[in-house]
Amino acid sequence: MDTFLGALVQGVLQGGVYALVVLGVIVVAKATKVINLAYGGILLVLTYLLWWLVDSMGLPLPVGLVIVLAAGVLVGFGIERLLMRPLMGRPEMDMITFLMTLVVGFTVMQGIAILAFGGVPQVMPRMFPEGNLNFAGVNFTYTSLFCFATAVAMFLAFVAYFRYSKNGLAMRCVSDDMIVSQSLGISVKRICSYAWAVGAVSAAVGGVLIGSMYAVDTNTGSFAMMRALPVLLLAGLDSLPGGFVGALLVGLAESFAGAYIDPHVGGFRELLPFILMLVILLVLPNGLFGKKAIRRI
Amino acid sequence: MLPGGLMTFKYESDMAIVRTRLQWILLCLGLVLLFAFPLTGSGYWLSWLTRLAVTIVAVLGLHILTGLCGQVSIGHAAFIGVGAYVAAVLSTRYGINGWLCLPLSGLAAGVVGVFFGLPSLRLRMFYLAMSTLAASYIIVWCFRNFDSLTGGFKGLSLDPLTLGGIDLGNHANFYLVAMAIMVLATFVAKNIQRTTVGRAFVAIRDNELAAEVNGIAVFRHKLLAFFIGCVFAGVAGWLWAYSQLRVNPEQFRILDSIWYLGMLIIGGMGSTTGVFMGALFLRLLEVAIDYIIPPLTDAFPSIATQLHVSLGLILFGTIIVAFMLFQPKGLYFLWLKLKTYYRIHPYSFVGET
């Protein structure tokens, strides 16, 4: 029973962080129809940046955080302006943008992170109180609790932004139809930039949280990406609440697999996201919350 | 665009791949030079060319899958790994003759490829790519964790191949095998484009709905594309295993899959010549990087170790991105433009005022 409760709590806490990670991908996918596979790379670079600013440069943590968030906005704008906007409207845009983000995330960003920050595993600066918390017989660290809280707060903030702000409304409008939005006086270019900036900022926060839960090394980017993808498939690419539920489910599945299957099959936990991806693809191609794709003839 | 003064009277000569006498001469000369290279070549370039041949066979498979049929695969390196591991496991654990492993490797990789291509029934582009991405991780995980069969992290060592008493373990002899398979693979790939199946692939790539309406069994052809592409990958894996004489999980990372896609992009999707150009381009760049790294590490000794790892990543990635932005049709298109310019030369100014 203790294993069960422990795995449950652990899974929910992790799921919260995954929700924040996947938010960045969903926002970009919703607004610009681009599946941002560069997300892991961006996350890696920004996480290393925070470590470098605080640990090597000796800046105080809040200053470092502000700089990292600003850097996130810049990276988002930069990628949108330099790489994505020239491709807009090109034939086979789906395939090209997809390959573009894949190449940028897995090679260029990875390379930059290694070149600039060494690519050695590093411990992130401490930002949450140390120690363990005991709740109903379940042990967990303060860090994971605070990470969960931060992630959920950020997630809700973003959701509120989409629901209630003017830009959020514009973003939803753009995701419906770019050309109609343009003719209604929405600057599609600006909205796409905003979406990428939001995506990169959520990458920064997600990376910092994951970094402080474990440590930061060159695999952090693909770690986050590989958790985000099954969530994305489960959520069906365009649903924010679906993203949250999906993230919790994936977090739970992962921690239960870690608790119950790992002792029998070593290393199963790291395989799970991919098996989940395959199963979702085969059984639920539209995800739990995605719009049913209707093929018109 | 045909050269001027070439008249064809039969359908066969209209469809021919090699059309002019000059092309025949160049082709024969090229083949002779290719197979005569070991007489003069240095060991370094021999093994480089062997690796190039393996790469080309692999990318030809990806070309059929992605370039012709339009199904993106990010798991190609893992499918190559399946071929390599099937050869290694069968020959070391079960003592099966290395040559017999060749068809088995191809077949095994093809079957695995079809399995991971199954989601293409209902899904397109991104989702399908996710399935191959998952394939990439799952397959490599299996290599790493089924210790008793695959040797875990350390991998397996193979015995060199022999053919009627000739030892194919040394570079020069295996080079010939690799080249022969590469030429054969090129022949097959080139001809697939002209068969019913190949044309169905292209139709599916260009417009799936139109293809279906025209009576092409889309799903079956997609799976067939996966099968053929992955058979090429399996054969490339077999070649890889016997050229390196050892396999381990580190050789089949997702990064390699990205390089294969990059070669396809740089060369230009949908042409076999493009495959050659792209593979040659990236492999030559690799050699160039080997040359520029020592002076760079001398210049910046503090980041020497990082440079080794990251320079290739950044440079390759940037070049692939640059091609996607500025020359999405790839090197082959440039070559085509040059050829057309040459062929219509005296009249190339007619259109301009």
Image (spheres, rainbow, N blue to C red):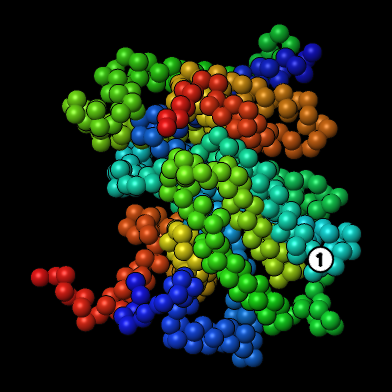
Q: Is residue B82 left or right of residue A12?
A: right
Compare residues B195 and A208 and report the one nearer the observer: B195
Q: Which residue is mark 1?
A: B100
Compare residues B346 and B11 and report the one nearer the observer: B11
Q: Position of residue A297 (x, y in %)?
A: 42, 32
> What element does badge 1 sit on?
helix
| Residue drawn at x 51%, y 62% as measured from the top left | B193
Amino acid type at image mark 1: Leu
Quarter of the picture containing the N terminus of chain A is top right
Q: Is any atom of residue A191 visible in this view?
A: yes
Q: Is residue B153 above or below residue B212?
A: below
Compare residues A203 and B241 and report the one nearer the observer: B241
Mark 1: few/some/many CA within 10 Å (<14, 14-19, 20+)? few
Q: Is any atom of residue B51 visible in this view?
A: no
| Residue drawn at x 25%, y 80% as measured from the top left | B345
Residue furthest to the top: A136
Residue furthest to the right: B94
Q: Position of residue A275 (x, y in %)?
A: 67, 34
Compare residues B146 and B197 and report the one nearer the observer: B197
| Residue drawn at x 42%, y 49% as measured from the top left | B206
Could you tell me which chain the residue with mark 1 belongs to? B
